[in-house]
Amino acid sequence: MSIDYDKLRREYRHVCLDENEMQADPIVEFDNWFQQAVAFELEMPNAMVLATVSKEGKPSARYVLLKSFDEHGFVFFTHSVSIKGQHIETNPHAALVFYWAPIHRQVRIEGRVERVDDKEADEYFASRPHGSRVSVWAADQSSLIESREYMEQRVEELEQKYGDGDVPRPDTWVGYRVIPDNLEFWQGRENRLHDRVNYTREASGGWNITRLAP
């Protein structure tokens, strides 16, 4: 099917992004942006692209959900035996991208990755719905399965096994924290003269703030 990509273009009309008015700490600035995305009632504002790289240097990207963030970094949960988990094991660096389309805002984050401790992983796992905790046990993420019916049968067997009781966290279901070295805040503007403000972590622990050309 032929698509006229020019007709997909949209003009961006939003406020100016002035680096002189932004927070000195990018985590505080991110919190402001995230709260605004939530206030706009955007669908799944915590959805983010996670990019990892294999030991052979091959990149891979997928959406995951941000589950928490603070001055230490951005946390998500997954299986350590998944493709992304294997990548992180051999190359503990990653990039995250948030894009909130209705307000034409994007945040890019790059940094090293570490596992959260077992206590934090246990607490979050326990907060998940019962069905989600059960499904985690059905098969290792990214492993080959014969059919959807196989997964449904496995879940049924596990439901019978655990009933309404406690479902333990598998050792392979873990949390990862992306500790940022670089964050870029992007605001769509008219005529593609977008605003891009970049934070780079300094050796002292502070942040250097610069403006990038669109």
Image (tube, grey):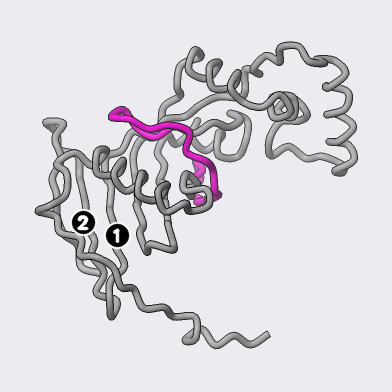
Q: Residue at x 69, y 39 (%)?
A: 142
User: Residue 200 placed where, x, y %?
Assistant: 20, 45
Horizontal arrangement in the rendering, residue 128 relative to residue 49 (left or right): right
Locate residue 186: give its quadrant.
bottom left
Q: Quadrant of residue 29?
A: top left
The image quadrant where one finds the N terminus is bottom right
Q: Is residue 44 left or right of residue 92?
A: right
The residue closer to the viewer here, 180 or 100, is 100
Does the segment drawn in magenta span residue 30?
no
Q: Is the stretch drawn in magenta largely helix, strand or loop?
A: strand
25 vs 37, left or right, is left
Q: Where is residue 107 in the image (x, y as percent from the top left)?
A: 34, 52
Location of residue 183 in the rendering, given as x and y in whole percent from the top left corner: 28, 47
Q: Quadrant of the C terminus?
A: bottom left
Classify 28 as above or below 175. Answer: below
Amino acid bearing label 1: Trp
The residue where tag 2 is placed is 197
Foreground of the two, 1 or 131? 131
Q: What stretch is highlighted in magenta?
A: 51-75
To which quarter of the image does residue 137 belong? top right
| Tag 1 secondary structure | strand
* Residue 65 lies in the magenta-colored region: yes
Q: Is residue 168 above or below residue 32?
A: above
Marks 1/2: CA–CA distance: 7 Å
Image spot of residue 130 (x, y percent): 71, 24
Tag 1–tag 2 contact (CB < 8 Å): no
Q: Which residue is pictured at 41% across the width and 78% down the height?
A: 10
N-term-proximal mark, 1 vs 2: 1
Kind of residue sitting beneath label 2: Val
Q: Name the residue under label 1.
A: 186
For label 2, the SS is strand
Q: Can residue 51 be seen in this view?
A: no
